[in-house]
Image (cartoon, rainbow, N blue to C red):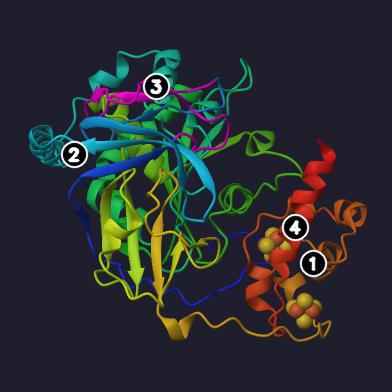
Amino acid sequence: MKTFRIGGIHPPQNKLTAGMPVTVLDLPRRVQLPLQQHIGRPAVPCVKVGDTVVRGQMVARADGFVSAPVHASISGRVKAIGPIMNAAGYSIPAIEIEADEEAHRADDVMRKAQIEFDTRPTDRTLSERHTPEELRRIIADSGIVGLGGAAFPSTVKLSPKAGHEPELLIINACECEPYLTCDDALIRGYAPRIAEGIELMMSACGARRAVIGIEDNKPEAIAALRRALDPAWPISIAVLKTKYPQGGEKQLVEAVTGRRIPSGGLPSDVGAVVNNVATAFAVYAAVLCGRPLIERVITVTGAAPVRGNFLVAVGTSISDVLGSVPDDVKVVVGGPMMGSSAVNLQAPVTKATSGLLVLAAGETRRLTPDPCIRCARCVEACPMGLEPYLLSTCGRLRMWPEAAEARVLDCIECGSCSYICPSSRPLLDYIRTAKSAVKTLNK
Ligand code: SF4
Ligand code: SF4
């Protein structure tokens, strides 16, 4: 079975919510919408305090090509525009909307009808009415960004230079992070709509064929995709051997095509473009149903009071999603390998939030690092062919030129090295420091 060749690890999967369907979480009474939920320039507010807004209305426009607009995820009144604290504890600009009771009830009715609509056959001819330019404009205006975690504006990826159209669209359905099952649940519930989204993405970027890369630990999702795909369509499925971090763009391209992306290169260097499976669903919803990206499916797992895969309005606070949790738990935004700890549970769920992992007090103990025993297990595990022990030493001793020379910028921050190290060394923490210093020096 196919997979990427260099490195990789097999952490316990802990997919506690596997098999659970997508459950709709009620709309909150208040949302906070950060102006930057994506890579690129922050969006610029196009409403003012006191304005009445309706669900789906654009409240901040994109500022340039590498940017994404923000839309209201509830109807109500703009209560504030200003700084809030994000989950990591940093101050970021956001728009706060307070629900209007009557409109809130109408939103609920409309939302349930929309979700019901997603289970029915769609008028596929609608997609044929759009040129690639129109599709890219709808995707951009709908605020769609990569939903696998990076949140890169999707239109940018789907806008190749003339004559450089990708040969292949790869859909990332690996969900290789332990605990997370939101993509799995979305595929099991809505595979036909995802197939439509993939066709639309192919039209938008000019790719002649698409491959859905999915790991073999999701048999129900694979079966749902097989049922949804017509064999006559140029969309196939590549079932991959489960291995972390297969969802990394470079690892996935290699696993699916056998081609390696060169150091510092992009999937386009080998004729491919990669998008997440949830992004394909968002494209379907935007183009065929006129729905901007105002909600997404996230996994709530670990020691959370209620686990599941929930459809959550962007801007809902983490505490509204989790319900009450004891003070001594640790909440991780994302998965355990690449996620980050939340210090502020009043912070909002954003377009980039794929999961909330609650770790009980006993599970959060940080191990004391021992000296490096030069076992090279970190080197064996690194999927980028790097020497993590060396990069981490460069970071610890502030040796930036040496870090650059050792290709620190190729690190995808997968955490495989820290996970595998028998001396519990915080390799990735130091590598991140070196990476950010080298990036700053290169500017
Ligand atoms: S975090 Fe970076 S250095 Fe460590 S294994 Fe992943 S890619 Fe390699
Ligand atoms: S895995 Fe840990 S102990 Fe082994 S070489 Fe790497 S840093 Fe040193």
Residue 383 seen anywhere in this rendered image of the structure: no
Q: Is mark 1 within 8 Å of ligand 2?
A: yes
Neighbours of disc 4 within 10 Å: few (<14), some (14-19), many (20+): some
Lower sequence index among marks 4 and 1? 1
Question: Which residue corresponds to mark 3?
Answer: 141
Amino acid tagged 1? Ser
Above or below, 423 relative to 9 = below
Query: Which residue does the image show at 88% across and 65% down from the upper left?
Result: 397
Q: Helix or strand or loop: what does disc 1 sit on?
A: helix
Mark closer to the observer (4, 3): 4
Residue 9: quadrant of the picture: bottom right
Mark closer to the observer (2, 1): 1
Query: Which residue does the image show at 70% across and 48% down from the upper left?
Result: 260
Q: Position of residue 30 (x, y in %)?
A: 25, 43
Mark closer to the observer (4, 1): 4
| Ligand 1: image quarter | bottom right
Question: Which residue corresponds to mark 4?
Answer: 433
Neighbours of disc 3 within 10 Å: few (<14), some (14-19), many (20+): many
Q: Is mark 4 within 8 Å of ligand 1?
A: no
Lower sequence index among marks 4 and 2? 2
Residue 118: assigned label:
2
